[in-house]
Amino acid sequence: MTNYLILFAVIFGINLLPAFGPPTWSIIVLFGLNSDLPLVGIVVTGALAAALGRFTLAHGFRLLAKYVSQKTRRNLAAVREAIMSRKRHGIAGLALFAVSPLPSAQLFAAVGLAGVPLAAFTVAFFSGRLVSYTIYAGSAALIEHSSTGDAFRESFSSPVGIAVQILLLGALVAMMRINWEKVLGPATEYRDQP
């Protein structure tokens, strides 16, 4: 039971980071190689911890949204309304994103800022992580111990990894700078206001 709690705490903590955390799959592989936990237990615990970590991260950004300017709030409301009016496309896109190896922290930060309901996003993320973590954990026996350490080092020192993180953080900042109200039209709650 202690190993499950440690696994959960480590993955939950990593998924609270908005950027530059080690990839969760590397923790899954590490536990797969160095513990006697069953594959199913590692995958389910890892996916649950990752989903709850991202859910909590999004809620943290939702709290930060209170401190942005009125103009930014209006823009975020326009984005929220656009996403909510096209739920099926958003969920399908997130499901594909959740299975991909791209970092998801910035996506959860963005939906948190926009005030989008998080339950469906989190369920899609959890489902995608069940699939990807099963693949990673299942192949853990084929990976030598040294490659896990390399994955940790690469997550902090790889020029491509750093560039992707910076690019995604930049995209999050750019999202906040775009006049979404002008692009998408004002949100219903702001239509009658000047």
Image: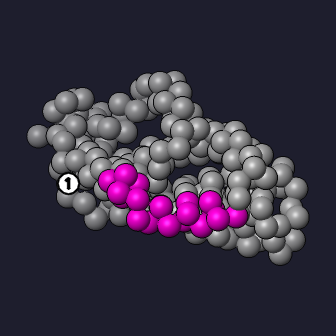
Residue 31 lies, in percent from the top left, at 75, 63
Q: In this rendering, does residue 60 appear at all?
A: no
- Count of residue discs: 1
Which residue does the image show at 20% across and 58% down from the upper left? 69
Q: Quadrant of the C terminus?
A: top left
Residue 81 in the figure: left or right of residue 174: right
Residue 193 lies, in percent from the top left, at 16, 40
Give the answer, above or below, for where 18 lies relative to 118: below
Q: Which residue is mark 1?
A: 70
Question: Which segment is the magenta one?
Answer: 145-163
Is disc 1 placed on a helix, strand or loop? Answer: helix
In reply to whether residue 55 is colored magenta, the answer given is no
Which residue does the image show at 60% across and 67% down from the upper left? 149
| Dominant secondary structure, magenta | helix
Q: In this rendering, does residue 129 appear at all?
A: yes
Give the answer, above or below, for where 1 lies relative to 176: below
Residue 188 lies, in percent from the top left, at 30, 33
